[in-house]
Image: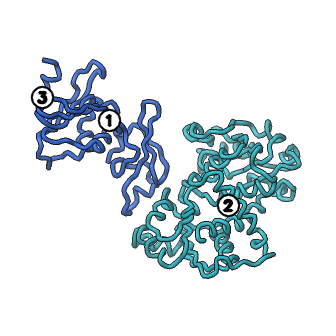
Amino acid sequence: MTERELVISKIREGTVIDHINAGKALLVLKILGIDEKTRETVSLAMNVPSRKMGKKDIVKVEGLFISEEKLNKIALIAPNATINLVREYRIEKKFKVKPPEVVRGILKCPNRMCISNAREPVESIFYISLKGNEVVAKCHYCGRKISDLAKFII
Amino acid sequence: MRHLISIEDLNKDDIIRILNKSEEFEDVALGKRRSRILEGKILANLFFEPSTRTRMSFETAMKKLGGEVINVSAQEASSIAKGETLADTIKVVSNYCDAIVIRHPLEGAARFASEHSRVPVINAGDGAGQHPTQTLLDLYTIKKEIGRIDGLKIALVGDLKYSRTIHSLIKALTLFETKIYLVSPPVLELPKEFLEELGGDIEKAELDQIVGDVDVIYVTRIQKERFLDEEEYRKVTGSYKITLETVKKMKESAIILHPLPRVDEIAVEVDYTKQAKYFKQAFYGVPVRMAILTEVML
């Protein structure tokens, strides 16, 4: 039995998000819109020892196949995350998250003078790009660039 | 072109087309030829911040082309702003006119307005953000006064850190084959991150080293508020001031530009030299805005 399986048991069907940067699992749930109203069984492990990453977080959502589009948003804060879609205890599909080109309503612009922070019917829009290994986002409205995106999740 | 929000929305061909069109309107701006090309059209000037020059030059441009202008003063605009959202204001005003010119204190306000407007929106400055019509008139001045933009050496002098005019102008200049010199006190240097994004031939320089070699010196105001103490401010501004001595070292054919208003970064005596083109530059705002108005409305 591996160390990981000691922490959380295998799931029969659903989505497993592995290799999340340590400490970011709660934000991952937030991005996926998983909160107290969720009916599925959600298990979460933080600071699990990992050979590749030192420490990592893992999230398992039973009975729910989260869309690839939604899962890719995780790349904003956990660019190394891998997704396993599990059916009958077997991995049906495995992929690494890819940052989306545009995200809406997920990041908050830190520029206080940006129209997206005004009392207006406005949803934040950011354009995502990769600068080396780092995920960078640029505000559609004021052009402000941000990195370390975990700080800016709404 | 539907809206004009940022100079980055334009490519080199768009810019050249607008500059050529501006040239066609110059005799109308000078009163030598009449045009009614925008007759029956109404422009709404929506200025949420005071501005004399930009608002007046848009108004002049529109009227000289036979169009009408409705104005909302800064005071009226700010009381509107208290009562309703910008989105609602734009939805209402865009029913009354054929185009909107907007100046607003918040960055991105013009882009946001364009998303709620049924008519074209022209950005006349959104906080520290964009002011594309200024950039187009700067480029037009260079083209008119020197005959070309490609192949020129251009020094940008003063506040390169905060000046939106400078930021837009650099982006546009890098679309052309220009050599750009950045001349500023260390505290007001062009932000590193901004510089990294730019392509083109750009280097830092001292004014003394390049003054005899450049074709254009573009001067901006250094604001007192950017400095911790007045002594430091005085020391810094002194070394970036354009005087008759500076002009003597310049090429005969070189020009001095400034977006205005100036404080004391260009000595008044310089106004009478043939290199001084900043008042001409203010005039060129009219034909350039005529070109922009026809571009979005026709």
> What subunit carries mark 2?
B
Residue that appears at 75% across and 67% down: B24
Instruction: Indicate the position of residue B171 as horizontal and vertical percent values.
Output: 62, 47
What's the residue type where badge 3 is placed?
Lys
Question: Horizontally, is A32 left or right of A136 in the view?
Answer: left
The correct choice, above or below, for B100 with respect to B245 in the image is: below
Q: Position of residue B199 (x, y in %)?
A: 62, 39
* Viewer-side residue, A37 vs A62: A62
Chain for colour cyan: B
Counting labels gives 3
Chain hosting mark 3: A
Q: Secondary structure at mark 3?
A: loop
- The residue to which callout 2 is attached is B18
Q: Is residue B228 visible?
A: yes
Q: Nearer the viewer, residue A53 or B50?
A: A53
**Coordinates of residue B197 in the picture (x, y in percent):** 56, 39
Who's blue, chain-wise?
A: A
Residue A20, quarter of the rendered image: top left
Q: Is residue A70 left or right of residue B36?
A: left
Q: Is residue B261 above or below residue B46?
A: above
The residue identified by callout 3 is: A10
Crowding at mark 2 (Cα within 10 Å: few <14, some 14-19, many 20+): many
Return the x and y of residue B8 as percentages of the image width and height.
57, 51
Which of the numbered marks, if any, corresponds to residue A97?
1
x 56%, y 56%: residue: B6
Tell me the kind of residue under disc 2: Ile
B63 or A63, which lies in front?
Answer: A63
Q: Are marks 2 and 3 on the same chain?
A: no
Locate residue B132 relative to residue B234 in the image: left or right: left
For marks 3 and 1, give the CA distance.
Answer: 21 Å
Q: Which element carries disc 2, helix, strand or loop?
A: helix
